[in-house]
Amino acid sequence: MSEETKKAAYRFDTQKVRAGYEPKDHKYAVSPPIYQTASYDFRDVENAKNLFSFKEQGFLYTRVGNPTVAVLEERVRVLEGAAAAIGVASGMAAISYTLLNLAEGGGRILTSPFLYGGSADSFKKIYPKFGIHFDIAKNLEHPEKLGEEIWPDTKAIYIESISNPNTVLLDLDAISKVAHEHGIPVVVDNTVATPYLYHPFAHGADIVVYSATKGLSGHGNLIAGLILESGTFDYKTEKFPQFSEKYYTLRDESGTYRSFPEVFPEAPFTARIRFNYLNYFGAALSPFDAYLSIVGLETLSERLSKQSENAHKLALYLSSNEKVEWVRYPALEESPYHQLYKRDFEKGAGGLLSFGFKGNEKQKEAFLNAIELFHYHVNIGDARSLIVNSPQTTHGELDDQEKAAADIPENLIRISAGLEDSDDLIADLEQAFQKAFSIN
Ligand SMILES: *Cc1c(COP(=O)(O)O)cnc(C)c1O
């Protein structure tokens, strides 16, 4: 067995601490170095020419590639079983570059009502100004009818694997099947699930985007994003004329212009993002944030399994609390998504859950003000437990109708379970409930 084949066969927990990094290529440094440099010297004139004509691979300028960022890209690529990965400055950059790359020049994206607030708000406010319009699908939970919502200019389906804040799960296998019958790819925001809990490519996804700010890195100390592609979707069709465009910069030795799929047949989607969007729009990931993400990834499985455990205990505690109207967490047997959870999520449901506070607005405010251990802020996926009133904060941009469609009632409180002792977390919620209901 070659060294390469042996390494490719390593399992998830080995890959998460090893993939994409060889100490011998970096002066035998055990921890991946932070390549804090803007640019890279050319070896000679020939090398410069080869780099610019893609004959040789290498680093030119950190806006389009950096060795520390490359370790993160390769590590996540291996964990997801993707053809290629690209790191960008934030989850929002990952989403916008992906959608622009798909629908540039105009078009429609079929999406879900169950989305991260920043996604939902930007889909409504910003993208239409670039000719990209969103249809909120009515049939995501009835994929057999989803084809009726795909128009000739629909360029992709965009969903979240575990939605934020509602933990809605969808049958991605069935959705992908319909998308592919219509010649369009499926983009999955896998931020909440992380590669530990869910592999969108195994269920038919074509592109996966991450906010690596959240559970992927897991310590609330950086902003980063990633885009991955399966390598199996054919973009050389009439729907995506931008992928057939031939560029002078991609010319071969005889001077013939070439397209991205011709030069990068295994990964045309991320190559086009790197050399068009990252290169020209410039939301590059900093080497330091890439380094922190690599370190965070080393404990991905351990964090996500403990967070799933803690979240499940909190969900059970809240379910039995008479001050709670409802609890949403797919691992609960009464969850409408429990069957899908059992089918697709063998390692747990993750750290995110939400509940309905049964009390008046004043009591809800008193409850949040009385919380001591949980952090009250808008992030998720941190090692520390977080709590927030989503409808008034993270999803505060949605109007009443949109909140109703997204199933976000005004009394929703979101929790992102951290790594603390669950008894301490439950005791904190309990004392806050008591304080809240001691007022009227
Ligand atoms: C936070 C988040 C984003 C945005 O990521 P940033 O890194 O904050 O830009 C996108 N999708 C989901 C599901 C998120 O939770």
Image (cartoon, rainbow, N blue to C red):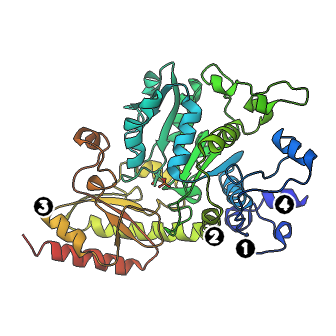
Separation (CA) of disc 1 from disc 3: 51 Å
Q: Residues within 10 Å of mark 3 (few under 14, many from 20)?
A: few
Q: Which mark is residue 190?
A: none
Is residue 303 found left or right of 372 in the rendered image?
right
Separation (CA) of disc 3 from disc 2: 43 Å
Is residue 238 found left or right of 376 in the rendered image?
right
Q: Residue at x 82, y 68 (%)?
A: 26
Viewer-nearest of labels 3 and 4?
3
- Helix or strand or loop: what does disc 3 sit on? loop
Q: Which mark is residue 31?
A: 1
Q: Of label 2 and label 1, which has the lower sequence position? A: 1
Q: Of label 4 and label 2, which has the lower sequence position? A: 4
- Residue indicated by mark 3: 360
Residue type pointed to by label 4: Lys
Is residue 97 found left or right of 431 in the rendered image?
right
Q: Residues within 10 Å of mark 1 (few under 14, many from 20)?
A: few
What is the total number of numbered labels drawn onto the structure image?
4
Q: Residue at x 45, y 69 (%)?
A: 309
Q: Residue at x 72, y 65 (%)?
A: 35
Separation (CA) of disc 2 from disc 1: 9 Å
Residue type pointed to by label 2: Val
Residue type pointed to by label 1: Ser
Report the front residue among 169 and 92.
92
- Residue indicated by mark 2: 295
Work out whether 410 lies above or below 322. Answer: above
Where residue 172 appears, x then y in whole percent? 52, 40
Viewer-nearest of labels 3 and 2?
2
- Helix or strand or loop: what does disc 4 sit on? helix
